[in-house]
């Protein structure tokens, strides 16, 4: 069910280098909503500029905190534990007694987000969705281990600045996977029900659309939302505590998940 709060408030521009803020002289609306996909979306609109959207990002429960700034009149801080970004807002309602109520509503909606327990996540299979059917467990585990070993080799050989998923999942690598029916069998149960043929597997894996999807995922993993992207893919985002690069962290999270399962 959709949960939402809209707060009349202005904002400040925060400079991460100088740690100083400059007020944006405009009326604004801060909107937070939890959608049917269990995603928390934050948006701030500049009302004076025809409600222009100037802030938009996904939030994660446990990594997001909205609180009053001590010693400041009607100023509130939105901070995160997974990156250094900060947002400062100033309440614009006539009734100052509503400030704390708005703050409570904001945090209540954050707490409505349902997250899997990290331990439970690590014990699930290392692919995003649950299998529809199970092949013989021993054979499937062996095939998955071979795939993960190849993935680890690709990562080791190509680690460097600006690394993308298409660097790791290169055309040569994907061709090697696509022509081996045993690898297809290891992944078959995680494919959409209408695409579980070997021919479709090969066609999709080597298609321009798949490469485009890898490029889009790389862009997301390189951005500020990398922790939420990794978590939405049912992986342990805490790997970012040791690995800043989102692409490398993503691959390591896949490998770690399988290791924890075993």
Image: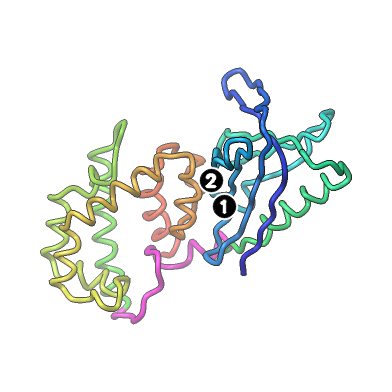
What residue would you read off at disc 1?
41
Q: What is the number of callouts on the image?
A: 2
Local secondary structure at mark 2: strand
Q: Which residues are magenta?
A: 117-136
Q: Alpha carbon of mark 2 to alpha carbon of mark 1: how far?
A: 6 Å
Q: Is residue 134 magenta?
A: yes
At 28% across and 50% down in the image, what residue appears? Answer: 214
Q: Please indicate whether residue 231 sits to the left or right of residue 108 in the image.
A: left
Q: Is residue 168 magenta?
A: no
Q: Main secondary structure of the magenta part?
A: loop
Q: Earlier in the sequence, mark 2 or mark 1?
A: 1
At 45% across and 67% down in the image, what residue appears? Answer: 124
Q: Position of residue 92 (x, y in %)?
A: 77, 38
Local secondary structure at mark 1: strand
Image height of 183 relative to 57, above or below? below
Can you tell which quarter of the image residue 182 is in?
A: bottom left
Image height of 101 relative to 191, above or below? above
Label 2 crowd bin: few (<14), some (14–19), many (20+), radius 10 Å: few
Image height of 104 relative to 204, above or below? above
What residue would you read off at disc 2?
57
Depth order, front residue of 238/110: 110
User: Quadrant of the image for the C terminus?
Assistant: bottom left
């Amino acid at each position: 069910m959709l949960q939402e709060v809209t707060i009349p408030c202005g904002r400040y521009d925060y400079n991460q280098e100088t740690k100083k803020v400059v007020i944006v002289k405009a009326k604004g609306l801060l909107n937070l909503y939890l959608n049917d996909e269990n995603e928390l979306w934050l948006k701030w609109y500049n009302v004076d500029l025809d409600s222009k959207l100037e802030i938009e990002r996904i939030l994660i429960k446990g990594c997001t905190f909205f609180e009053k700034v001590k010693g400041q009149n009607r100023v509130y801080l939105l901070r995160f534990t997974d990156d250094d970004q900060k947002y400062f807002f100033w309440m614009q309602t006539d009734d100052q007694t509503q400030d704390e109520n708005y703050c409570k509503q904001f945090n209540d909606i954050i707490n409505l987000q349902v997250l899997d327990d990290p331990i439970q996540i690590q014990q699930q299979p290392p692919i995003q969705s649950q299998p529809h059917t199970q092949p013989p467990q021993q054979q499937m585990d062996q095939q998955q281990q071979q795939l993960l070993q190849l993935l680890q080799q690709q990562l080791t050989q190509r680690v460097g600045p600006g690394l993308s998923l298409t660097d790791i999942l290169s055309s040569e690598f994907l061709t090697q996977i696509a022509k081996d029916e045993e690898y297809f069998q290891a992944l078959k149960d995680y494919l959409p029900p209408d695409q579980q043929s070997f021919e479709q597997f090969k066609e999709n894996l080597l298609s321009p659309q798949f490469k485009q999807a890898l490029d889009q995922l790389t862009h997301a993993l390189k951005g500020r939302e990398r922790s939420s992207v990794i978590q939405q893919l049912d992986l342990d985002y805490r790997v970012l505590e040791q690995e800043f690069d989102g692409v490398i962290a993503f691959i390591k999270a896949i490998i770690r998940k399988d290791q924890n399962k075993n």
